[in-house]
Amino acid sequence: MKILVIGKNGQLGRSIQKFISNYDLHEFTLAGREELDLSSSKSISKYFDTHSQFDVIINCAAYTAVDRAEEEADLADQVNHLAVKQLAKFANSQKAKFIHISTDYVFDGQNESPYLESDNPNPINVYGKSKLLGERAILKVMNNNAVIIRTSWVYSEFGKNFVKTMLQLGSEKNEINVVSDQTGSPTYASDLAEAILNIISNDNFKKTIFSTEIFHFSNSGETAWSSFANEIFKLANLNCKVTPIKSEQYPVAAKRPKNSTLNKTKIIKIFRINLTPWRVSLERCLKNLSKIN
Ligand SMILES: NC(=O)c1ccc[n+]([C@@H]2O[C@H](COP(=O)([O-])OP(=O)(O)OC[C@H]3O[C@@H](n4cnc5c(N)ncnc54)[C@H](OP(=O)(O)O)[C@@H]3O)[C@@H](O)[C@H]2O)c1
């Protein structure tokens, strides 16, 4: 299969690249902002007009600056919604299957239990709203052959993320304040990358036609940011005390959901995806970052 990966320089895009040599039956094309700029509908059209058809399009790119999005709503809407609609239209016209990544931030966080795919979204920030509109555009344009995967709290060896920030802070400070009233499930981007590549090989995805569906994916288990930070320090042997604080004590531009844990039963059942406990994956990432042996 000819597979296009959009967003090659992001955490997920780079994580997918770690594994593609294991899938040499497929031909991968990788596109970054330089080749395919999602802020420009002309750039998107030009890209598809000048490349041969793909069998699968994986969109790992997004406007992910959650706080900045509050000031840049138009750009977030273009990249996370309008560009996604355009990609879905190209996928449709090429008869390509489409895999798109969305977010736990489509929910308001008021649920007591992990969110199901069928739960009502109600985003509480601009980023979440733009991602929800992206999901809805795909559902409208592609009745069939798209897979939308909502994920949460993504970290990796690459780019900027909570784990790398904590490793930095933990090596500089003896004590830090971390929010303790937001619960979620961390996702090691490598695990999501492997899940996506497994989905592509799954018989339910290889069918000529399947109905477009939303799935949830993260590592298993849940935690709060403060406990996540504690575990990072423990595993990396950093002597930094975590003081739990309330969200109100850490003012940021965009509101965050209090509970953004996702129920993953559907992706396990339909695509036979195995989930790794978040602590196990965190340890693997720290090993890959050479922070532990
Ligand atoms: N990070 C999280 O905690 C999290 C949580 C839930 C869901 N997600 C979703 O998971 C997916 C992957 O996230 P990630 O953590 O891998 O994100 P990331 O590391 O921030 O990477 C996003 C990528 O999108 C690219 N991009 C941004 N604007 C673009 C544009 N106008 N044209 C082309 N490319 C553009 C960026 O390009 P440059 O490298 O050139 O800037 C970057 O490579 C996204 O859909 C995100 O919404 C992420």
Image: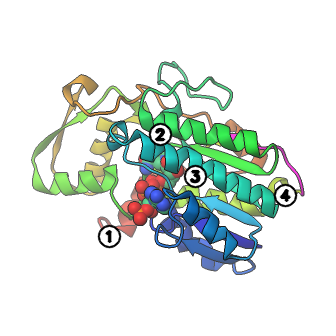
Q: Residue furthest front?
A: 42
Mark 3 surroundings within 10 Å by alpha-carbon count, few (fewer than 14), some (14 through 19), many (20 or more)? many
Question: Marks 1 and 3, Cα distance to the nearest angstrom?
Answer: 37 Å
Q: What kind of colouring is applied to the model shown?
A: rainbow
Q: Position of residue 59 (x, y in %)?
A: 60, 58
Mark 1 surroundings within 10 Å by alpha-carbon count, few (fewer than 14), some (14 through 19), many (20 or more)? few
Return the disc, 1 or 2, that comes first in the chain's sequence. 2
Give the residue type that dot 3 points to: Ala
Residue at image mark 1: 290
Return the disc, 4 or 1, that comes first in the chain's sequence. 4
- The reply to whether residue 129 is visible in this rendering is yes
Q: Is residue 143 left or right of residue 8?
A: right
Circle 1: element type: loop
Tell me which residue sits at (53%, 40%) in the image. Answer: 131
Residue interval drawn in magenta: 208-214
Residue at image mark 3: 83
Question: Marks 1 and 2, Cα distance to the nearest angstrom?
Answer: 23 Å
Tell me which residue sits at (55%, 65%) in the image. Answer: 43
Foreground: 47 or 238? 47
Assess whether mark 3 and mark 1 are in contact (beta carbons under 8 angstroms). no
Ligand 1 within 8 Å, label 3 CB: yes
Mark 4 surroundings within 10 Å by alpha-carbon count, few (fewer than 14), some (14 through 19), many (20 or more)? few
* Residue 213 forms part of the magenta stretch: yes
Circle 4: element type: helix
Give the residue type that dot 1 points to: Ser
